[in-house]
Each structure stands twice: as C-alpha cells, then as structure tokens.
Image: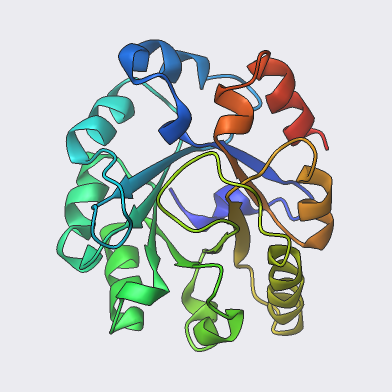
C-alpha cells in the first residue's frame, strides 16, 4: 500500500474499529467489513501497560488479513512498538500508527515503519498538543487524533478535539503537506459532519457501527455525512 490510496483530497474515509466487533464470530464480522462503504479496517492493539486493557495481537491480525481485501489500519497502543514493526507488517498491516507519548526516538520509528513498506501514522492522546509532532509531520502519512482516552471502546467524544483537528488541518495546508487526519473515539453519525468540516479525513467508528441496531444505516450515515 502506498500513499496514493489517499490521493482523493475531496474524499473522507471510514474505518470501522474491529475492537467493537463480535469476537465469537470474527469471520462473519470480517465478511461484513467487505461492505463497499468500508475503506479501512481499524485494528487497536493494546498491551495492558500503555493503556489499561489488552485486546489482540499478531495472530488475529494475520487471520483477518487472510480473509479480507480491505487495507488494515493498525493502531499500536503499546510500549516499545519499534520492537514489533516488522512483525505487524508481515502479519498484514498496511498502515502502522504509533503513539507520540511512548516513542523517545519518534523520527526513527516513523522511518522504520516506512522502510517496512507500511504507511506511517502517529497518534496523539487528548491531552497532547498537536505542536509536538511539528518536526515529523512532513514524514507522516497520517496523524491520529484521539478524541477519547485510549484503552476502551464506547467512550464519549471529547469536544475539544474539534479545535485540535482544525489547528492540525491549518498547519498541514499552510505547509503544503499531504498528511491525512484520522479521528478515533466517540465518532458517530451525530458528529461525523462536524469532524469532516473541521478537517478530518478518516473517521474511525466502533460502537456507533457495530453496536447499532442497523449497522448498514450507521455506516451509510457516517460515510455520507
């Protein structure tokens, strides 16, 4: 996968978060994610240390990759992600996103991701200002703005995130960069339009889709906001 996947500047992308799926029926859930309105499958890897939860890892990602044609958007909520970049790429990750908060040598980790053949993303927590990634922004394919505190699905959207998205978008435009803005946490049909208007390019939605009484309708509302 290369950055040309995001070449349409007028298009916003939807990435359902697999963390909210029914893990008793993984194959069926992945089959549903072949839906034409799904652009990416977002996969949250949690280590129980950086965040207070443990999710899934390499075997699950590899299994999903074996039965889908959708790009895998892997979000590493873990300490020392640099130890595992190659392994996640081999398992099928098309995009690998690491957290600013855990990478002492962030530029080096970003380069490691790019050398693996994946697109490189950096995530920032709700309390982290967007300015901290100024020096690596030109090297990134995406910035993931966390609009809830990482670690659990189903949390309420933090309204201040809209201002962060606007600030980041202005910086990207002013510098003539192609970096995309991804938003994860509390995304729903109710706020999707506001997020896109603020500058978001990729909307990650978990509970709002998978826990909806009509997930097809929820997906359509978020995609066509």
Let me know if residue 70 appears in the view. Answer: no
Let me know if residue 73 appears in the view. Answer: yes
Where is residue 47 shown, x and y percent of the image? 23, 52
Q: Quadrant of the C terminus?
A: top right
Where is residue 80 shown, x and y percent of the image? 20, 68
**In the rendered image, which quarter is residue 131 located in?**
bottom right
Query: Residue 46 or 33: which is nearer the viewer?
Result: 46
On screen, residue 193 versus residue 181, left or right, reads right
The residue at 38%/45% (across/down) is 44
On screen, residue 166 versus residue 204, left or right, reads right
**In the rendered image, which quarter is residue 134 located in?**
bottom right
Where is residue 65 shown, x and y percent of the image? 32, 30
Which residue occupies the extreme bottom position in the image?
135
Position of 223 relative to 135 (above/below)? above
The residue at 60%/56% (across/down) is 182
On screen, residue 171 versus residue 180, left or right, reads right
The residue at 64%/20% (across/down) is 212
How many discs mark residues in the rendered view? 0
Query: Residue 14 or 212: which is nearer the viewer?
Result: 212
On screen, residue 65 versus residue 166, left or right, reads left
Position of 58 relative to 139 (above/below)? above
Where is residue 31 shown, x and y percent of the image? 45, 14
Way the structure is coloured:
rainbow
The residue at 49%/70% (across/down) is 140
């Amino acid at each position: 996968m290369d950055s040309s996947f995001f070449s349409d500047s007028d298009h916003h992308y939807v990435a359902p978060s697999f963390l909210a799926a029914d893990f008793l029926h993984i194959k069926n859930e992945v089959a549903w994610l072949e839906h034409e309105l799904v652009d990416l499958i977002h996969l949250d890897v949690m280590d129980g240390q950086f965040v207070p939860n443990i999710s899934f890892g390499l075997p699950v990602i590899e299994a999903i990759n074996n039965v889908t044609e959708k790009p895998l958007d892997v979000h590493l909520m873990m300490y020392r992600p640099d130890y595992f970049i190659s392994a996640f790429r081999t398992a099928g990750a098309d995009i690998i996103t690491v957290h600013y908060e855990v990478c002492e040598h962030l530029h080096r980790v970003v380069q490691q991701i790019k050398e693996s053949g994946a697109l490189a993303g950096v995530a920032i927590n709700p309390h982290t200002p967007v300015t901290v990634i100024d020096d690596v922004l030109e090297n990134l394919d995406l910035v993931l703005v966390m609009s809830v505190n990482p670690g659990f699905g189903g949390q309420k959207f933090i309204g201040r995130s809209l201002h962060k998205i606007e600030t980041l978008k202005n910086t990207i435009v002013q510098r003539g960069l192609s970096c995309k803005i991804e938003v994860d946490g509390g995304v729903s049909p109710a706020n999707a339009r506001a997020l896109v208007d603020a500058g978001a390019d990729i909307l990650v939605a978990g509970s709002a889709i998978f826990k909806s009484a009509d997930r097809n309708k929820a997906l359509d509302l978020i995609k066509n906001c």
